[in-house]
Amino acid sequence: MGKIGHDFDPLSSRYLGRIEAHDSNEDRLNQLKVGDFVTAQISRFDPAVDTKPYFETYRVPYVKWMRVLDVLIYVSETLGIEYAHRWYCGVKKCGTCAVRVNGREMLSCWEPALPDMVIEPLRHLPLVRDLIVDREPYERRVMELKPLLVRTKPYLGLPEPITDREMRAASYAMDCINCMACFSACPVLDLGDQTDFSGPAPLVQLAQVALDRRDGMDRSVLIKNTASIFECVSCYRCEEVCPVEIPIVSRVIEPLKALAFATKPAENKHQSAFLDIVNSRGRIDPSALILKTQGLRAVLNPARAIRLWIKGKISPVQTFFGSAVPGIEYVRRLFSDVKGAL
Amino acid sequence: MMKFAYYPGCSAQSTCKELNASLRVVADKLGLELTEYASASCTGSREIRAVRPELFLALNARIIAMAERDNLPLMTVCNTCTLNFLDTKKRLDEDPEARDRVNEILKSEGLRYQGKCRITHFLWMLLDDIGPKKLKEMVVRSLKGMKLAAFYGCHIVRPPAHFHFFDSRNARSIEVINEILGCESIDYSGRTECCGFHTAADNEKVAIKLTGRHIKSAKDGGAQAIVTPCPLCHTVLDGFQKEMEREVKQKLNVPILHLPQLVGLALGLAPETLHLNRHMVPVKLPV
């Protein structure tokens, strides 16, 4: 349990940090000192021999500034254990060394070693051996999304007349190092075959061109159907683990949703219904939203609706005859006045 | 008397009316004076936020500006509303041009976004404004013996741009409150996972498949109930629990409490006052 502090800055939006600050960089860096040992449980799997992965525990002497990668290298080079892990640059550029440490995706080259570590390969990708996964599902999805710039206007030659401001929307996604940390962290991908969601990483690749103003291709079908972007649950797990801090939800997924919506608003019933209800009443009535979004599908489960009604969870009176909030004219004015990007 | 502008959000005024009602009685007990704005609109949830980002900023700035006009901190009871306010505040505070344009639109209503309003959530308010010491003194009925699982929901622990967690599983605030109220906290894998609400109105399949296992993991860990600070999480955990039982092939029957209801119980309020009978999963508590 973290310490409970009460000395806070009254203007900071996040007081909570004072209570829960024990996962700061400083705290993680100061857990070990020279002379200590790191206990690393590393996931092992050899497809020629094993039917499923298992853990093997190694004790590694801590040296100053030891990273997770240094622990892995010590096991293979110094202890001479024949096991497979992938890394190349060691400085957060190549994106090959991502693993899960104690259930959290990270670049092994960039995070400090901890006293006790469970080191596993990334999820949602087929296991090749030990900590190495096959990136094929990711690459296949990226190809499906056709992340190539399609010009509909003639190329004007170098230097291209485009400003940094105009490139901003696409620029966030361009920081991606293809490490697959977000692909592993995404809970929707836990559903496997039961979801068509492409996952965050392929969408980042798509955003690099789709949000580029030089791109002229209609990508709404790719975004909505091929990538099933509306199955994203907005949980921000991808943003949390992204080692290069791309705001994946707010600068990749949401702008792509906006693009798909703007091209064909009528086909995005849920979003249109949401806008309609807020515009007419100011607030959302969930039953009205579900009726508008799902149509007949919503009334196909009357038993559920009746259970909800009995408990007062839904109110048909409010749904069909609900009135608008006072001052609705001001809310409606926002809808009509706000046109361009702010 | 502590004063707050109170924004219940759409859920607490429709599907989770019991949250709004219980918050009101708990606020009375805690000595809070709440100002609610009847003309406040929806904050745009995830939908308006994504497809009309400019309108999203204006909707949120309008509500924040109402609190600023009265010089009050703005308290919510919904995770998604909280994040929407925080995101709007961050954007408008960092981008004076966007702020000027928003203010131009808000002018007709006599409102102005200034950026001096503190955004807080009921959960944070308990620890930051009331404080653990005072809260502990107010407990008249210790919930000793009760085993509770905290379900944080996403939008008050992520994204790291606001909450600065390296690993959001390190969130502890609800467990701190559990300890103050005397009940035992259960550790389980779903604590800071997603309930899937934001895809549920369109297609509840994802929410049901994703969330059943979290309730199961809390139950297997010995939880008698789950407590959540978010009405959206509550809607999924409570409202879809029957469907989830089919998914995890196990009887779950885990009552889901709103955080103010839990606090209210410890403050000595009667279960009926806290509307514990309005849940889909019947609430039978050991204390």
Image: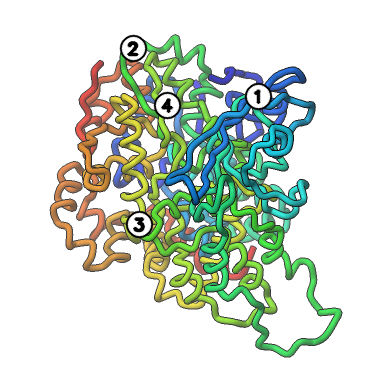
* Label 3 close to label 4 by CB (< 8 Å): no
Label 2 resides on the chain identified as: B
Q: Dot 4 surroundings within 10 Å: few (below 14), some, or many (20 or more)?
A: some
Pointer 1: what residue?
A8
Q: Is residue A120 visible?
A: yes
Q: Which residue does the numbered mark 4 point to in the structure image?
A: B187
Task: Report the residue marked by disc 2.
Answer: B144
**The disc labelled 3 sits on which kind of residue?**
Ala
Q: Tell me which chain the residue with mark 4 is part of.
A: B
Identify which amino acid the numbered label 2 is placed on: Lys
Q: Provide the secondary structure element on which disc 1 rests.
A: loop
Q: Residue at x 72, y 42 (%)?
A: A109
Chain of the residue that carries numbered disc 3 in the rendered image: A
> In the image, what residue occupies the spot 28% across and 25% down?
B224
Q: Is residue B57 left or right of residue A69?
A: left
Q: Name the amino acid, label 1.
A: Phe
Badge 3 crowding class, 10 Å Cα cut-off, few under 14, some 14 to 19, many 20 or more, is some
Residue A22 in the image, given as x and y percentages of width and height: 62, 25
